[in-house]
Image (spheres, rainbow, N blue to C red):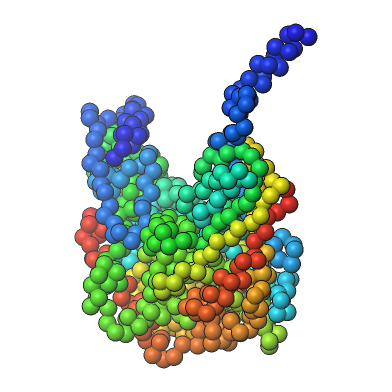
Amino acid sequence: MNITGWFALAALAFGAGGCGVADAPSHSPEPLEVRLPRNFPPMFVPVDNPTTYEGVALGRQLYYDRRLSPDGNRACADCHLQEHAFSTPHVQGVLPHINLAWSWNFLWDGKFEGTLEEAMIMEVEEFFDTDVERLREPDLEEMFLAAFGSTEITTKRAAYAIAQFQRTLVSRNSRFDSYVAGDEAALSESEFRGMALFYSERGECFHCHATSLFTDNRFHNIGLDADVAGTGRGAVTGRASDDGLYKTPTLRNVEMTAPYMHDDRFATLEEVIDFYSEGVIYSDTIDSLIPNVTGGGLQLTAQERLDLVAFLRALTDPEFLSNPELARP
Amino acid sequence: MRRNQAIAILMALPLLLATGGCGDDAGVTDATVTIAFEHLANDMPIALGSETPYTNAAGNEFGTTRLSYFVSALTLTLVDGAEVTAPGAHYVDHETDATRTYVLPVGVTTGDLAQISFVMGLGPDLNVTGAFTSPPESLMEWPEMMGGGYHYMKFEGRYIDDADEPFNFMTHSGGLNGTDYSFEVVLDATGREVTDGATFTLEMNLEEWFADPNTWDLNDYFNETHRGIMGDADAQASLMANGATVFSLGAP
């Protein structure tokens, strides 16, 4: 941690003083450095919320803790299941919590833009409407003390802790990653052909599902519907040019995040590929990256479809799906 | 009167000192210069959208939905031969106003300008995978399977095809499998002067990408079977040749 970070922590600790609040005599949470592969972008960590073991532990606890909701009936993890890459097949339109540390807009329509900390504050204060009184229990007070230097519990601190935990939800260990790291045997022949198609203009996947994160974090109309008026990003911005645009989801662990699209209209990856191959529909805002719209899309062969799905399955990260450090504490 | 003269001398003193004083013709060496980027089609400033209001040399009606590109090694050369080159590259995205002005990260010597030159795209020293780690620049990545590095340009939109239907086009340029298709643009700038705070405008005339010397009928390059040009070395070379007439220097 740099010196500014320590000052910020100290300020937090001093600022937390007050009646009924216990301060840690010498508060020094242990910095946690999230391990990243070389081809990942640098992770932004704000000065006022450095990632620490204690903060992540609290965030993880809160992520799985139904005390976060006023009536105690739901937690983040109820809709973000680790075995489904922190998404769920049971609730429509839930995006997976994967690599959100690099996101600057959230939800399919980007209704929320900002930092991870701001997004988590929104989740705690608006989505959950958290009542901090419910969190004032000895076990959590002890964790807040360890993370922030006092037992003072605020929605901001809860959100900041969850943001710290989110920064550890990094998926980086798929067979594709092994291939990139130099293990040429990591991909089968079919998966390799699928990768070649993915990174070609015949497959035209890589422009939106870009970089090692497999998302550009931007919005596109991919041709799902003919009538897009007032939908998607356009419903947020009010601009007709944004109608029908939705955020590009990451493809990491996509095998585990069915059903697909913002409205869960496709049950399987095969259905998704069939759509891109022959089901694309023109509308005024359709993205210029969608080829051959009048012809229905990519017009892939049966073998190409198999190969592409095989490659997408090579983006599954078993370690991420079962890592006990990310599981319910 | 004498008091006013004294004030005038005092006010002029910093200027005299900054310009080197008596008998020294050398200009200010740390002037701030800004390059502005304007994008035109058929002599009109472009507007992104699904419409197809422009016409190229082949008679294709087209419009643009996305325009982003790199310029690098931007160099100002003065009449006296002095020149300064901005290190690195600058990313331009028509949709993001802030990227359409480039405050050169180096001080520039004031004086009469002879030319402005730059590389359209990234030269081999900059076009290295991993050089840009964060968006938006990192989103210009060029697949490793095509040689890696970055797109030099993404110029996309729609044209009206031979079937009278709107058809997407993606004029994406970049280095392909080890061959560099970036090129130097040299613009005559005689009659312009570098002063502190000066702004020079580079204009990209979009329809010129499709003409001179090679006339592009978009039906030939973007159709049901030929989806794009990234993997097409002939198209990359043709586009590079057409690039010679794409840029001009805006009116002072």
- Displayed quadrant of residue A146: top left
Q: Position of residue A314 (x, y in %)?
A: 31, 75
Q: Residue furthest top?
A: B2
Residue found 70% across the figure and 74% down from its top: B56
Q: State whether residue A317 is above or below residue A266.
A: above
For this orientation, the residue located farthest to the left is A324
Residue placed most toward the observer, A168 or B141: B141
Q: Quadrant of residue A87?
A: bottom left
Identify the residue at image location x=53%, y=71%.
B172
Q: Quadrant of the C terminus of chain A?
A: bottom left
Residue B21 place in picture, x, y as percent: 61, 24
> In this rendering, is residue A23 above or below A31?
above
- From the viewer's side, name the closer residue of A133 and B94: B94
Residue A147 visible to an observer of this rendering: yes
Tag count in the figure?
0
Residue extending furthest toward the front? B23
Residue A325 is situated, as x and y percent measured from the top left of the image, at 22, 57
Residue A60, placed above or below residue B10 = below
Residue nearest the observer in this picture, A208 or A158: A208
Quadrant position of the N terminus of chain A in the picture: top left
- Pick out the residue farthest to the right: B1
Answer left or right for B121 relative to A319.
right
Report the front residue among A249 and B170. B170
Horizontal placement of B94 versus A78: left or right?
A: right
Can the viewer see residue A97?
A: no
Q: Residue at x 57, y 76 (%)?
A: B238
Residue under the image location 24 percent in, 35 percent down: A28
Task: Return the x and y of residue B246 as percentages of the image width and height.
Answer: 64, 65
The quarter of the displayed image where residue A309 is located? bottom left
Q: Is residue B2 left or right of residue A13?
A: right
